[in-house]
């Protein structure tokens, strides 16, 4: 992904917090400490956009910015609203963000942003083939990058597996809910990743989400034919990826 600018700005909208910071697009890292403000409740588009403006104003950032959101995003319109306020469904969110913040916004799926960042600057930077990123948390978010190009809005966390929505069985939240040990969870992840491997045949799988910090504890119990590695950018991936996609 060619970088046309040296500096950008990324916002990462989550269920509990909205984080943002300027990003050095040459090095793929934050160029200042990030600011985090709690997500308003109810988290309507207008309320969230108001907090995004606060984050931008705190840095005096006046230019365009990238912004993640946990939903399918088509041309700035949020089509889904899993785990967020239903008022986001079919909302022209990019327009709302522009009108409230006074800056042009590029809105992207949160897993796509993380995947783009890992592909450009992180764990997948040396892989030129097909990369699947999966974020394991409350759900399973996925990003698919084929030969350097992002295929947006893949929802492979929601494939049907053994009669279930896959993320309800294999996400980190399912591990906690069902009180699984690492080996038991690893068996479910093996089943999930094997299924996705047969659909996509990736060259590399990158695993993100908070549980990626404990990769060495559970990964020995996950058996895939594809090399699987932990994400490198951790909590900064969304911010970096949003800024990257906004300026690519």
Image (cartoon, helix red, strand yellow):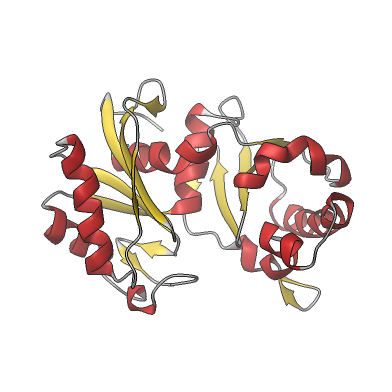
Residue 233 x/y as whole percent: 53, 33
Direction from residue 28 to residue 107 in the image, left or right: left
Direction from residue 125 to residue 226 in the image, left or right: right
Quarter of the image with the N terminus is top left
Q: What's the residue at 57%, 63% (across, down)?
A: 155
Position of residue 104 relative to residue 24, above or below, is below
Visible residue check, residue 117 = yes
Visible residue check, residue 149 = no
Q: What's the residue at 83%, 53% (across, down)?
A: 190
Q: What's the residue at 73%, 61% (across, down)?
A: 176
Position of residue 234 relative to residue 108, above or below, is above
Rendering quarter of residue 139? bottom right
Residue 72 x/y as whole percent: 44, 64
Q: What's the residue at 29%, 72% (across, down)?
A: 91
Rendering quarter of residue 157? bottom right
Task: Judge by depth and name the residue closer to the eye, 107 or 150.
Answer: 107
Count how many numbered circles sit on residues in the image: 0
Direction from residue 31 to residue 116 in the image, left or right: right
Q: Residue furthest top?
A: 27
Quarter of the image with the C terminus is top left
Task: Judge by depth and name the residue closer to the eye, 169 or 200.
Answer: 169
Residue 175 x/y as whole percent: 75, 60
């Amino acid at each position: 992904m060619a970088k046309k600018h040296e500096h950008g700005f990324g916002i990462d909208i989550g269920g509990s917090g909205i984080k943002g910071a300027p990003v050095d697009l040459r090095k793929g890292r934050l160029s200042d400490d990030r600011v985090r403000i709690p997500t308003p409740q109810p988290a309507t588009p207008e309320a969230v956009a108001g907090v995004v403006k606060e984050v931008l104003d705190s840095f005096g950032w006046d230019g365009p910015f990238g912004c993640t959101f946990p939903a399918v995003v088509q041309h700035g319109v949020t089509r889904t609203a899993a785990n967020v306020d239903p008022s986001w469904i079919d909302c022209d969110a990019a327009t709302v963000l522009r009108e409230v913040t006074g800056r042009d916004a590029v809105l992207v799926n949160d897993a796509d942003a993380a995947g783009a960042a890992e592909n450009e600057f992180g764990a997948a930077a040396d892989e030129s083939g097909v990369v699947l990123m999966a974020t394991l948390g409350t759900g399973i978010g996925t990003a698919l990058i084929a030969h350097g190009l992002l295929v947006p809005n893949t929802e492979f966390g929601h494939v049907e597996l053994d009669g279930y929505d896959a993320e309800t069985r294999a996400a980190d939240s399912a591990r906690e809910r069902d009180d699984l040990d690492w080996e038991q969870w690893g068996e479910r992840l093996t089943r999930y990743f094997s299924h996705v491997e047969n659909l996509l045949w990736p060259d590399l799988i990158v695993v993100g989400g908070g549980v990626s910090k404990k990769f060495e504890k559970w990964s020995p119990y996950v058996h895939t034919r594809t090399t699987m590695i932990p994400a490198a950018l951790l909590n900064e991936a969304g911010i970096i990826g949003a800024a990257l996609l906004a300026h690519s």
